Image (cartoon, rainbow, N blue to C red):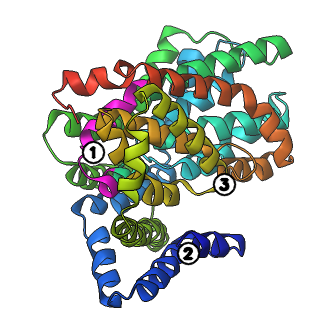
Amino acid sequence: MIICFLALMVIGLPIAYNLIVTTLVYVLVAGFDPIQMAIKMYGGMNSFSFLAVPFFVLTGQLMLRGGLLESLIKFVNAWFGRFKGAIAIVTIGASLLMGSIVGLAVASAASLGAFLIPMMKKEGYSAPFSAAVMSSASLLGPIMPPSVLMILYCTAVGKTSITGIFMAAVTPAIMIAVLQCMMAHHISKKRNYPSYRKASWAEKVSATKKAIPALLLPVIILGGIFSGIFSITEASGVAVVYSALLAFFVNKSVKLKDIPDMIVEAASTSGLVLVLAGAGTAMAWGIANERVMDMLIGPLSSLPPWVFLLLVNIVMLICGMFMDDYASTVILAPIIAPIAWALGINPLHIGAVFCINLVIGLATPPFGITLFVTSPVAGVKLEETAREALPFLAVTIGVLLLVTFVPQVSLWLPNLMGYTG
């Protein structure tokens, strides 16, 4: 399996097909009935939670096309625009708010980047810095709930509450956003990047009023989930209905002709997640058949938990540099999570550490996808963006280490709400 997987990766076969072919080779060599593979794949895809994925993607599309993005940007600008590096801070703040709606890093980087990177350049920010801020801020999308990555993780490993891991991610996401804003302000102050005048209270109130419809969406999504009013899937459906009402009838900026494109976008993203989930489940079944977990748990169970967590950070950061976050989740989560549980590590804690690690990889060279998205928009080379992104990645990794070795940073909120795993 390992040889086949690595060989197919070297020749560039897409990871979803790689997993399917690798598992099929294993099934044939091991002498199993191929129908077993189909059954396992179907079992991996047959999860009610996955219904939330197309709904959340549709919600993001409606928000982006519905003109609600500008109201969020103006809201953040009214309150924080007076600081040095105003637009960079606005970019990070808007990414945090968009993350609580869209849940996808690439969607945030593409949508916000097309609007804010040219604005930063126009204000005198260097092009590499503009792209770096956007690529780093977009990481908040998959960390701030709701997160498609975390839904996939919980489905892949079991024994972990989706609502609980959402709660565990809230504090780290806010901490990352605050520290990135402080870093942007520090760099902007050194380089004398511009700020806006201080907004009056009347302007702040006006911007807040206009942003209320958009701000209510994360409140509805997260408030409904955390309070137990509705499930993750029900929350995603409510979010689509609410955002559709705003887009079609309040702002009137989305037309019926836009619906097919939005459905295709939702279907393609959901299809990728489902295929990866099915293929990953089948491969995990093969790994279980070979008793790989028994071989790993034995030696690793003697390690202190902090050593194991340090190893997880190193391995996952490296994987994030080279592999897609969804693929890494379906391959590695079923291996790492049970070992962590055997060591007594809280399921929500290891889940948060795992997912934040992979998200950081989205902005890490050489294959950080958000770097590839933002660099062309800014008109710079990927290496230039990566160089400017290093300070932002450093503070993000700092939060990751804090979450790793001080579990209560992520666990206090789910524990407060009664979620222990």
* Marked residue nearer the N-terminal end (2 or 3): 2
Q: Nearer the viewer, residue 182 or 73?
A: 182
- Identify the amino acid type marked 1: Ile
Q: Percent from the top left, x then y, of residue 37?
A: 34, 81
State whether residue 20 is above or below residue 380: below
Q: Please identify the quarter of the rendering in which residue 271 is found.
A: bottom left
Region of the chain picked out in magenta, as a range: 154-171
Quickly name the residue at label 1.
162
Mark 3, residue position: 322
Q: Closer to us: mark 1 or mark 3?
A: 3
In terms of image quadrants, where is residue 316? top right
Mark before the other along the chain sequence, 1 or 3:
1
- Compared across the picture, whether 399 is left or right of 192 comes to left
Q: Amino acid at mark 3?
A: Phe
User: In this figure, which residue is indicated by the disc labeled 2?
Assistant: 18
Comparing labels 2 and 1, the label whose residue is closer to the camera: 2
Residue 242 in the image: state x and y as whole percent. 29, 49
* x 51%, y 61%: residue: 327
Location of the C terminus by quadrant is top left
Instruction: Report if residue 156 lies within the magenta region.
Output: yes
Residue 343 seen in the current view: yes
Q: Position of residue 54 (x, y in %)?
A: 37, 63
Magenta span: predominant SS is helix
Q: Indicate the secondary structure of the residue bearing disc 1.
A: helix
Lower position in the chain sequence, tag 2 or tag 1: 2
Give the class, few, some or many, for how many residues have Cα within 10 Å of label 2's Cα (few <14, many ≥20). many
Say whether marks 2 and 3 touch (CB < 8 Å): no
Magenta span has 400? no
Query: How far, Cα to Cα, is label 1 from label 3?
Result: 26 Å
* SS of the residue under disc 2: helix
